[in-house]
Image (spheres, rainbow, N blue to C red):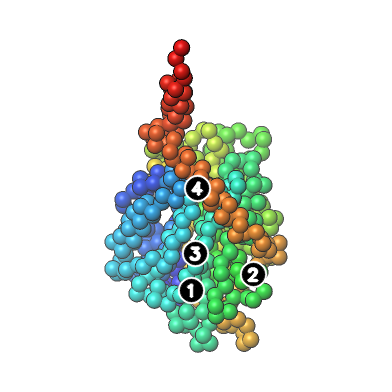
Amino acid sequence: MLENKITVQIGTYNANLQGHEGLPQNLVDWLQPSLTVSQFLGNTRTASDIVAIGFQELLPLQLGLTGLSKAVMKSRDDLIRSQLESHAPNKEKYVLIGKAVYVGIALLVYGRDDGIAKHVSQVQTQWTGCGPGWMGNKGAVGVRFKVSAAFTGQDDGTSETYTFVNAHLTAHLHKLENRIEDYQHIVQTLLFPEPLDGSFPSSTTGRYSNIYNTTHLFFFGDLNFRIQAPVDMTRDQLEAKVRTEDGRNELRAYDQLSITRIEGKVLTNLREGDFWKFQCTYKYKLGHVDLYDTKRVPSWTDRILFMTVGDDPSDLSRSGITPLVYTPVPSYVASDHKPVMALLQIPSPRAIESGLAATPLLTSPPQYTNDPMWAQKRYIGKVLGWVIGWVWALFWFVGAGNAVVGVCGSLMGMMGFAWWKTPRV
């Protein structure tokens, strides 16, 4: 902890379907910034209290739809935890608080074993899909848990709830409305069971609460919002602006997420650090540190947002959560996205007025009500994805790693069999 405040490190990375190859074996570029900042603030290097890592497109889609992600998740967990501990300045150890995975969207949340992890309870995980037919090629996963008053230092027994959501929203510049609908669907269907102790509001529908029913909310991932530049700005002019801070400061006025968030249409009431101070994280040519692909307009697709109890919904420029670091990791070249990392300082627990719930919670925006069909939609999407995934995987296997070759080969095989069965005159 820094100055008796909890530090949370969040990383998000679209791994471009790379599976086991999606991360380099050495994660020091990802972890080092947080250690440097902690030393500057606290005069000593200290590891983050909580580390949350989100992946999108973690593995080929056909394998994700069929649910064959266990081996990849184990390898990512083993690598991340080993790297966290090998680079920890004081030999801190980490435990996995919770993990959630749906198709290619995965979230792992760790806590320091010598601190916050010992005070975590009521760990919950959830998932939802917002692709075609509610499949999980796009969607979100979440992890929620409670931290006891013993760690927060509240004499009145006040505990706090943390909610982490990793999302992958609809792609392409012209599909802004789809992204807005994706977020609404996530809020209305990524629902967590209310704990038996009644510490969440009883007013939530059907004993399930949405992502806003928490003390601290973190929403991140490949959100796919693009720069909607004026028609008279050429792509070369836009890229030139991306490469200077003054130019990026100008471009943020055309950032779809910033515009729609201020309008209250998406990521309602959440805050963000100064994203325009770093270069756009998409779309890079594979294998290159700093070469954009001309097929897409450079954009800040990979984002980390947050809010906490006490944040004023009318002033999105301020938050009780302090972003200490917000930066991409340019050295990763296996994907057309760059990973993004944030180090956040959580405010000290505030005193709770007598008569309120034992856990201080955010107020959910009124436009988001629980979808009464949320469970049915999730499982329709899961079954549909499972069927499509296994058919796709079969053709992929027959085609030796190429589904198109597999389809063609299967068709030729059926035609040959039909010819063979045709009676000869």
Instruction: Give the mark nearer the N terminus: 4 vs 1.
Output: 1
Q: As displayed, is residue 389 above or below residue 94?
A: above
The structure residue drawn at horizontal position 67% and vertical position 47%, both measured from the top left corner, is 177
Mark 3 or 2: in front is: 2
Residue 122: assigned label: 1
Tell me how far mark 2 sits from mark 1, CA to CA: 19 Å
The residue that disc 3 covers is 125
From this viewpoint, is residue 257 visible?
A: no
Question: Given contact means CB atoms under 8 Å apart, are the residues at marks 4 and 2 in contact?
Answer: no
Q: Would you name the residue on which mark 4 appears?
A: 386
Q: Which SS class for mark 3?
A: strand
Residue 296 percent across, percent down from the top left: 54, 36
**Dot 1 lies on which element?**
strand
Kindly report which numbered mark, 4 or 2, lies closer to the viewer in this rendering: 4
Image x and y of residue 143, in percent: 49, 64
Structural distance between the alpha carbons of marks 1 and 3: 10 Å
Tag 4 secondary structure: helix
Res 154 visible: yes
Labels 2 and 1 touching (C-beta < 8 A): no
Circle number at residue 106: none
Q: Which of marks 2 and 1 is nearer the N terminus?
A: 1
Residue at 34% x, 54% y is: 75
